Image (cartoon, grey):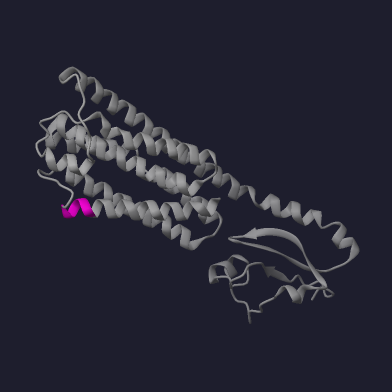
Amino acid sequence: MIQSRTEQMIILGSVPPTDDQWAAAGVANRGLVQTIRVDDLRTFIITYGGFMVSRPWGKISTLSTDVFRNYGITIVQFRRALPGKEAQKAKLVAAMNNLIDAITRQMNMTSGEHKLEAGLLTGAQGNFSGFWGYWTNHLFNTDVPPIAIWSQCFAELAHARSTLKEGKFGESGKSIVRARSELLKASGVYYRWKNGIAGAGTKMQITIGVVAVALMLAAAGAYFATAAEPTAVAAVNKVGALIDTADSVLADVVTTAPGGAAAPSVVAYEEALEEAGETVEQLLKMME
């Protein structure tokens, strides 16, 4: 094939390409698929380089001194094909930072308002024994919620920010999901106390919109689509569905009368958030 100058393309990888990947390579109507192993290439070398949908690919050439001497060109070609993926990674990191900032701003604004009102009304703060425990013991929210309801959100934000800087994308993503959840739970307690059930529902919807995960998930989807990881793209969509479900459940909890840790809706909320956090962590670890 080389002697007849008929270009022979090889797709590099450890598993067979999908039909979509073959089509992108221009050989959707190919014949028999041949698996080429390292030992089969002992007298050959892969020259030229690029990325076809998900896989690196190149031309099979006869190994020679001249070809080997100029092999650096192939390395450059592969590197030139990577910026699209790196650019998408940068966009995902930026989206993660933006969501951290949005959660931080919303927490500071709402907790600041809470601190001001709590100080004016009571002059002191009580102890906090957990979000659902508070809900169970104060069904009608007659007491000022303790300022400590914001503590866990603050801690998760700090962890999300530090791990993102360290390149621990999985840990950071999970903490972002948790920080957002803690913000919404604390906001639900505060808004219900301040605005009553009806007013709390409106406020919760606004807060959910302010800290929406859509842009972060869109950036993640674009990154993994560039890397052609079908299972990863499916996981991104799964996370979005889980978080939407959790948001809806939490809004229902906030706008109903008695809550409590044993309520089915509360259990559903915690399960959805736990699964979302675990999925995000596993997904973003692929970036590390």
Residue 255 location, x and y as percent?
Answer: 15, 42
Q: Which residues are magenta?
A: 263-267
> What residue is drawn where x is 46% and y is 47%?
171
Q: Nearer the viewer, residue 108 or 232?
A: 108
> What residue is drawn where x is 54% and y is 68%?
20
Q: Nearer the viewer, residue 31 or 133?
A: 133
Q: Is residue 280 magenta?
A: no
Position of 25 compared to 130: left or right?
Answer: right
Residue 89 location, x and y as percent?
Answer: 55, 46
**Residue 228 to residue 190: above or below:** below
Q: Quadrant of residue 212?
A: top left
Q: Nearer the viewer, residue 187 or 154?
A: 154
Outermost residue toward the bottom in this view? 32
Can the viewer see residue 260 in this picture? yes
Residue 106 location, x and y as percent?
Answer: 33, 31
How many tags in the picture? 0
Residue 247 location, x and y as percent?
Answer: 27, 46
**Residue 154 to residue 42: above or below:** above
Principal secondary structure, stretch drawn in magenta = helix
